[in-house]
Image (cartoon, coloured by chain):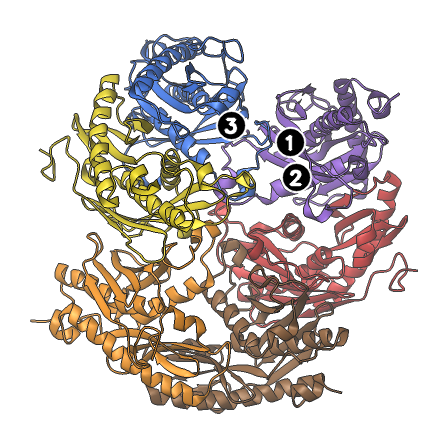
Chain colours: A purple, B blue, C yellow, D red, E orange, F brown
Amino acid sequence: MRIDGRKYDQIRPIKITRNYTKYAEGSVLIETGDTRVICTASIEDKVPPFLKGKGEGWITCEYNMLPRATQVRKIRDITRGKVDGRTMEIQRLIGRALRSVVDLKAIGEKTIWVDCDVIQADGGTRTASISGAFVSLVDAVNVLHKRSPFKIYPIRDFVSAISVGIVNDIRMLDLCYLEDSRAKVDMNVVMTDSDEIVEIQGTGEQSPFTKEDLKELMGLAEKGIKNMINAQKNSLKMDSLWIGTGGE
Amino acid sequence: MRIDGRKYDQIRPIKITRNYTKYAEGSVLIETGDTRVICTASIEDKVPPFLKGKGEGWITCEYNMLPRATQVRKIRDITRGKVDGRTMEIQRLIGRALRSVVDLKAIGEKTIWVDCDVIQADGGTRTASISGAFVSLVDAVNVLHKRSPFKIYPIRDFVSAISVGIVNDIRMLDLCYLEDSRAKVDMNVVMTDSDEIVEIQGTGEQSPFTKEDLKELMGLAEKGIKNMINAQKNSLKMDSLWIGTGGE
Amino acid sequence: MRIDGRKYDQIRPIKITRNYTKYAEGSVLIETGDTRVICTASIEDKVPPFLKGKGEGWITCEYNMLPRATQVRKIRDITRGKVDGRTMEIQRLIGRALRSVVDLKAIGEKTIWVDCDVIQADGGTRTASISGAFVSLVDAVNVLHKRSPFKIYPIRDFVSAISVGIVNDIRMLDLCYLEDSRAKVDMNVVMTDSDEIVEIQGTGEQSPFTKEDLKELMGLAEKGIKNMINAQKNSLKMDSLWIGTGGE
Amino acid sequence: MRIDGRKYDQIRPIKITRNYTKYAEGSVLIETGDTRVICTASIEDKVPPFLKGKGEGWITCEYNMLPRATQVRKIRDITRGKVDGRTMEIQRLIGRALRSVVDLKAIGEKTIWVDCDVIQADGGTRTASISGAFVSLVDAVNVLHKRSPFKIYPIRDFVSAISVGIVNDIRMLDLCYLEDSRAKVDMNVVMTDSDEIVEIQGTGEQSPFTKEDLKELMGLAEKGIKNMINAQKNSLKMDSLWIGTGGE
Amino acid sequence: MRIDGRKYDQIRPIKITRNYTKYAEGSVLIETGDTRVICTASIEDKVPPFLKGKGEGWITCEYNMLPRATQVRKIRDITRGKVDGRTMEIQRLIGRALRSVVDLKAIGEKTIWVDCDVIQADGGTRTASISGAFVSLVDAVNVLHKRSPFKIYPIRDFVSAISVGIVNDIRMLDLCYLEDSRAKVDMNVVMTDSDEIVEIQGTGEQSPFTKEDLKELMGLAEKGIKNMINAQKNSLKMDSLWIGTGGE
Amino acid sequence: MRIDGRKYDQIRPIKITRNYTKYAEGSVLIETGDTRVICTASIEDKVPPFLKGKGEGWITCEYNMLPRATQVRKIRDITRGKVDGRTMEIQRLIGRALRSVVDLKAIGEKTIWVDCDVIQADGGTRTASISGAFVSLVDAVNVLHKRSPFKIYPIRDFVSAISVGIVNDIRMLDLCYLEDSRAKVDMNVVMTDSDEIVEIQGTGEQSPFTKEDLKELMGLAEKGIKNMINAQKNSLKMDSLWIGTGGE
């Protein structure tokens, strides 16, 4: 049994609140256990310089934690004078994950800014951010769709993420902070609704792991991803992207 | 009648949620109309260099807006590379307002960090921040009080803030964003429960104003402050600071 | 009697030297007691991005102190890596004060940069800066007027500023540094020659103040402003802006 | 056949030059094909603040490319004003990889700074950096060992890294730049001489991949790692760490 | 004849005003023609880290131009975000020049901060800064001497600087801005009262120069230095440093 | 006899390796004794803003040391947050030296970026950089020449640099690090193949020097420059620039 009574292959309760704030084209509060992240998707009618004139869109992400989202108050980036490496890695990861399921040409010359601001951190903030950000992205894309319907609906598949790891020699799904801080192996997996892998990042800094571990952890992750994508579908009230939005 | 149906001397609905997040010693969500601010108070067991060894405490504030708290997405400070002047002014203002009602010697060599993060901005974010921050400060001070009771309870009085202004030649209380953006005169007032002024900042950049205006605006502000302090008292479930917390 | 022998409602001697340096369109040394500030106004033939193509001009201000303008040497901003909050507040205040009396449309697509560099600081540097900057602004506007006469003279009124405060429970006008450092209440007031208020910023961080205090301090400020505007008129050798410059 | 005539499961020629520069405790030039990286390991007799007094050592890495290591000149970080996200990810990865095989307690309160400066980049600079950095680390640790022999030799295992990926639907080992720039799936793997995984980072931003792909790519990586570790052993003239350095 | 009527080997009028501001231990306004620089020397009772505990003092310099010291307004360093290379070179030069004539051991563990702020720039600001800074340094050292007499008077010799150059193929002394901007060769020379060279920096970016040119320019510089040192002596009212200050 | 057995007027062995890396238009490794610098010249088809539309080219230089090029590891600029003054001086010096022998109009609207990255520092890195950078510049200019022959060959003369100094009262040529760190007088000289001076920078911070010293040091420098220019000619396989490259 785990700290919070869960089974090893069980994820925490997921709650997704859409339209959480009123200005953003997509605005979602995602809660997985005690981890809470506000994800907003904002449309801008231009693209970064490297895409100008190519007829393609772009999706970029920024991730941040409120100073007291954590047990000990974290100094703001602007006070330290730079974004720390962890934050950079996470926001690059979220951006890649979202772009992997989007047809950027179908979007046209627009940028969608996705902001993930962590209100409360209890492990798994980066994976919760991806899962929540995807829902806000769908809402923002549907705002564009209502303004002027897409010929090709730009979102090709659902995408979600979950963490897995090895704690006290036991492989576990969806680590909370206390588990995460003791994990010898820590892995984040991003997958689509078609069971394909978008990203896998596993690290055994404190102790290397075997190929068998890798295989088992991937199995746990797959299970968690399915739960998360179900939660996304329920929240968006659609079984598939094509029927719900691009549709007849 | 105003945009949102209020009378000129009427403030927007106030909602104060304590214990909004789980780690901070004080954690408050304050909502005034559509303006929503998360205020946390965090205790640190040391003081800034200029106070070392003086036996006094310190209260400092940081203010920030989530990028999509506003109609148009605002670039993060860390991306611009600096805190903008408006943010600096606001966080200095909040800090002064809180310190004005606290006996820093009674607190001892501790710093209380107050973070005001605006989730949604619809005018009056700096005054809502002061009013919410005060409640989070009381909660944090009471955490200290429980750990080791103060001889002198460090908070001397309630403090709240409200905005007033002149819009279309009419003097108004508690401006929402649409009113604020058209105001010719804009004033923020910070007052205590003893009806005393802690801070007044009025500006008529677009058109100067008279001493008569100043007097009338102060009257409106006083009315708004009373409402706000009542909301603080209800939320904290105490009529006065001494009875509620210091007490027997 | 005050430290320097003045009455409570008496301002320090004012000296305004125009054409203090040779390159700037307007260049003024203002001295109020031992406070000395160089104010220059520089014309640039373009406007900031947010005004491009609107046919309007802009006035912006930068404020700085030489490192040894003060008793203890102050580290330069560039060494600290950022402008401190106090400086930001002051330069924003000076900018608003000047713009409040100028018809920016009449100026056309030009920016006037006003630089206030404090050579020696003995209290009241921000208010001296406003009063001196106004004179440099008039000189710069008149340079434009000579190049190509304005149809509408862009400066609508004189503007000056003064500090007031409560020191040892006594309300005083134009605080020098020693008084300022002991003041419980500190207020800066910006007014026009038409007796209207452009800006009021009062703070009672160390002890709140009453509405009666506010009223009395405003009276003192009004008196100081009149003296300061007289000094501006004498220096500019004009009784009113319209006769002296726009005119026949 | 590949661009440079290699087979799909073949790595490029590896050349490791020890003692490449004269000041660093460990100094290695590693060449894998046309990719060339200078790796130095420098000993500092103190640890970062978070380790002070704990009796443990630390290994940290910095990674950089000379401006013209690439086809198009890259602006220096100091000119852009910040380290880019890619660089941060890489230097964090190298640090984790090295620390995973080192007993930091055995090292004592010292920091080993590993600098990887890319002279010429033709794909795989991060994996070459890890492989070369490990050799420089061994040399630096042996300098410490000669000064004062370790009771427990601090390096537990060899560690190397290699890239794999899917290009034109073909799974390949050790991608050169031209292959890397066309890869739909890109994966970097760090493994020890005991066939265990230290880190796996795979991304299919342009197209997700299957679990079958993951398995096959891991097999290729394992093969490449074996070659690389052989090159390290030859260069260090030791078959195992214990015999070669910690003594019989 | 030159632009301003001077002979080729003639320097501009020099005016040195001591005690220009009231707080600094040494405070000088130096004017050479239309070039005006405020030089202050400030005493700090500690030394930089690299000198701690060595019983030696340090002299360091900062140089800056007010934004409108020049014909076109110059953006402040803090706005650009960095000190420009020219400023860095100049402040390093001034520091070396002053330290070259001071016995830093005799000063003891103190830092003297010399600030050179250019009010108006008409060529030769770096050499005027050196010459003026020296006078402010003597005044600051004499403040220390009065507090507690030195056994060895720390200043060993007078030091001054002057510019020379080749303009329109003519070698000239003390270039004003118009001459400087057309000079093909530009040289700054720092010398002592003992006719020795402390620093020589000559550049022929637009056209190389001969050894004959070098010799002749050195002769002109020597003449200018003598004039400048005389001005320093007159201002300080002392013929030699030992009699005037160390003495009986 | 000197530390490394050289005579006082003898330079260290020079080795120039062209085409050191494969991407840059010019790429040189220069070694003078143990000092090793990679110099690359990169062509960019645009000019800085101040030259736009003038039909002229520009040459700019950046200089850097790898962290462990020195005995003690040097913190990277990006970690310190700024380029240090020494680096700025050096890169400005290299840029001026190269531009002094180039006809920028003949180059047309192009920028040549010269990067000097020090791999190993044993004194004289700035002069080695100039001498090596010149060779890389010739190679880059010849790349342009091959693409489209110049009417006027843009390089007018060879340029080289060398250091001289006074160590233990002895005047010496080409100081290594140990000599440089003990030198009382330190001078860098840049000269052309026509025996003309491009730049002279001499400093006697620790003890001033005489005109006789200056003359003798110039003589030593001249000798060293001749050796260095010979090495450049041998490396480039041309006796004069015009015959080797501009010609038939």
Amino acid type shown at disc 2: Ile
Q: Position of residue E56 (x, y in %)?
A: 28, 65
Amino acid on which disc 3 is placed: Asp
Q: Residue furthest right?
A: D1
Q: How much space separates mark 1 and mark 2, taking CA atoms? A: 9 Å
**Can you identify the residue that label 3 sits on?**
B117
Q: Which residue is mark 1?
A: A125
Q: Kindly report the distance in space between the C-alpha atoms of the residues bearing marks 2 and 3.
A: 21 Å
Marks 2 and 3: which is nearer the front? 3
Disc number lying in front (3 or 1): 3
Residues at marks 1 and 2 touching, judged by CB atoms closer than 8 Å: yes
- Mark 1 or mark 2, earlier in chain: 2
| Front one among E119 and A100 | E119
Name which residue type carries label 1.
Thr
Q: Is residue C16 visible?
A: yes
Chain to which the residue tagged by mark 3 belongs = B
Q: Are marks 3 and 1 in contact (CB under 8 Å)?
A: no
Q: Secondary structure at mark 2?
A: helix
Picture coordinates of residue C54, whole percent (x, y): 54, 38
